[in-house]
Image (cartoon, rainbow, N blue to C red):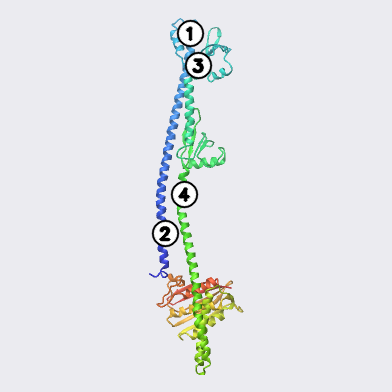
């Protein structure tokens, strides 16, 4: 299979294979990411469920301690009634029962005082208050957590029974507070690295936050915005801890999960950029190698032609001295001059040619005149110009190389027509450019080969080298900074267009 002829097909096949590889990699990596993401989401669901159950456990424990506190209050009330019965002078019944009630209190600290807070008796108070006459200062503050039980006695004298939480209850309550704080810490520093914000009952004020990368003030607008974002991602968890108002746990996906979300896209972009860079680098290297090959080949060709050409010109001069061979000598000299022109063209191809203002019309006319005398009479050349009146149309050209382009286009047209038909060169201009259309009445070019005809080695001839149009493109686009392309082509003929800047 000819590579140049089917280069577009090869490009399509390679592009398709590359796309399949990239899409397969993207699909597989996305599959793995989705599995990891789902596992991460499952961990978050388990964490949220555990937090919810832990909060319910804490709430239940809080209710238990509230009941325990209420029971202690009832015990104190019972103690007060027992004291009242014992001190009631009218009481004639057996007092042992009430004494048992009082003596059975071995946990609740109580202090009995008069109306002026003089201590009358005490139980379960550590350290002992036997040496303290009045309930005041720090001791009074300790026993003022609950309102005292008032006991009415004879002569309108009132006694007050002060009490506070038992040591067992206090230690248990401290344990509950530690449990609450441990619960908060566990929520904030969770093993799933989930960003968490705990708010008050209004769901607006942040009380705690954890696993949040940026430092955000608890009352800032950024924190409120983050809470709103978390609310949209997951339903907040309601918690009720001991001695506190309702609170809400807001949480979002972990940083790892967010990274996994964008991972396939990053992989796709990385592979795409790498392939693009590799393609550009390879294409640049290939173009550079082609340029060096063109230059080296052109210089070597000019050198190889130049050596025998000089010798042949010397022999022509000798032939001119022979009157019988003068006519033949002049004809040979014309062809040698032609070879000399070709040698100069190759020499200029091998280096950067100088551009000078040249009349385009005259250059084209000279080429057509040369070709007409060496082409079949069945081929007709037409040169037309649609230029503004008085326009000299001088452009920066290298006349020899530009003439070579016109010559190559015309020769290709002659081959396409089978040595019979019309070749028309039409010149026109725009504000900034001069347009040269070269049309023939040949068999045409398939649309799929519009670009391939300029590739080195592409040819439809059995003995063609496929270099003429490639050289023409190099001369027009690389040296003259113009454009050359197939304007249109049908079964009735083809038109090439050359665009040169004024």
Query: Residue 109 got which mark?
Result: 3
Number of residues whose C-alpha sits closer than 10 Å to that of mark 3, classed few (under 14), some (14–19) or many (20 or more)? some
Which residue is at the far bottom?
324
Mark sitting earlier along the chain (4/2):
2
Between residues 9 and 423, which one lies in front from this camera angle? 9
Q: Between marks 3 and 4, how big is the CA–CA gap?
A: 64 Å
Q: Magenta-highlighted stretch: main secondary structure?
A: helix
Mark sitting earlier along the chain (2/3):
2
Query: Residue 86 got which mark?
Result: 1
Q: Which segment is the magenta one?
A: 83-88
Mark sitting earlier along the chain (3/4):
3
Residue bearing mark 2: 18
Q: For the residue labelled by badge 4, is the local secondary structure a helix, a strand or a loop?
A: helix
- Label 4 or label 2, whichever lies nearer to me, is 2
Above or below for 232 versus 468: above
Q: Between marks 1 and 2, how big is the CA–CA gap?
A: 100 Å
Mark sitting earlier along the chain (1/2):
2
Mark sitting earlier along the chain (4/1):
1
Q: Between marks 2 and 3, how big is the CA–CA gap?
A: 84 Å
């Amino acid at each position: 299979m000819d590579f140049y002829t089917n280069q577009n097909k090869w490009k399509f096949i390679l592009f398709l294979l590359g796309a399949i590889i990239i899409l397969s990699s993207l699909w597989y990596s996305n599959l793995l990411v989705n599995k990891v993401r789902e596992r991460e989401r499952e961990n978050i669901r388990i964490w949220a469920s555990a937090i919810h159950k832990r909060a319910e456990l804490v709430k239940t424990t809080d209710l238990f301690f509230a009941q325990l506190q209420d029971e202690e209050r009832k015990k104190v009330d019972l103690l007060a009634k027992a004291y009242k019965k014992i001190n009631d002078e009218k009481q004639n019944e057996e007092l042992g029962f009430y004494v048992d009630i009082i003596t059975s209190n071995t946990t609740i600290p109580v202090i009995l005082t008069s109306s002026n807070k003089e201590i009358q008796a005490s139980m379960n108070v550590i350290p002992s208050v036997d040496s303290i006459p009045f309930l005041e200062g720090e001791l009074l503050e300790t026993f003022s957590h609950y309102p005292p039980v008032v006991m009415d006695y004879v002569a309108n004298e009132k006694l007050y029974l002060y009490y506070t939480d038992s040591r067992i209850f206090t230690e248990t309550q401290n344990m509950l507070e530690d449990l609450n704080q441990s619960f908060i810490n566990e929520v904030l520093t969770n093993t799933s690295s989930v960003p968490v914000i705990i708010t008050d009952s209004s769901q607006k004020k942040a009380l705690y936050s954890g696993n949040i990368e940026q430092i955000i003030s608890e009352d800032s607008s950024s924190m409120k915005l983050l809470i709103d974002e978390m609310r949209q991602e997951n339903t907040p968890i309601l918690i009720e801890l001991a001695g506190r108002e309702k609170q809400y746990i807001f949480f979002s996906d972990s940083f790892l999960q967010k990274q996994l979300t964008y991972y396939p896209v990053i992989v796709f972009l990385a592979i795409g950029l790498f392939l693009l860079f590799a393609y550009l680098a390879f294409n640049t290297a290939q173009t550079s190698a082609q340029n060096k090959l063109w230059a080296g080949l052109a210089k070597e060709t000019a050198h190889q032609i130049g050596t025998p050409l000089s010798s042949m010109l010397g022999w022509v001069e000798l032939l001119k001295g022979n009157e019988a061979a003068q006519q033949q000598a002049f004809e040979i000299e014309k062809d040698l001059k032609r070879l000399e022109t070709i040698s100069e063209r190759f020499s200029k191809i091998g280096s950067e040619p100088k551009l000078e203002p040249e009349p385009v019309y005259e250059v084209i006319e000279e080429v057509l005149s040369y070709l007409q005398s060496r082409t079949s009479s069945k081929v007709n050349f037409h040169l037309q110009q649609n230029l503004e009146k008085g326009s000299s149309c001088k452009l920066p050209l290298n006349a020899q190389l530009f003439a070579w382009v016109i010559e190559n286009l015309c020769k290709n047209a002659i081959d396409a027509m089978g040595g019979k038909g019309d070749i028309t060169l039409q010149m026109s201009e725009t504000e900034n450019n001069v347009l040269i259309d070269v049309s023939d009445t040949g068999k045409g070019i398939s649309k799929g080969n519009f670009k391939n005809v300029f590739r080195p080695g592409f040819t439809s001839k059995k003995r063609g080298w496929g270099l003429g149009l490639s050289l023409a493109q190099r001369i027009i686009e690389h040296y003259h900074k113009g454009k050359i392309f197939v304007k249109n082509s049908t079964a009735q003929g083809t038109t090439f267009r050359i665009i040169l800047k004024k």
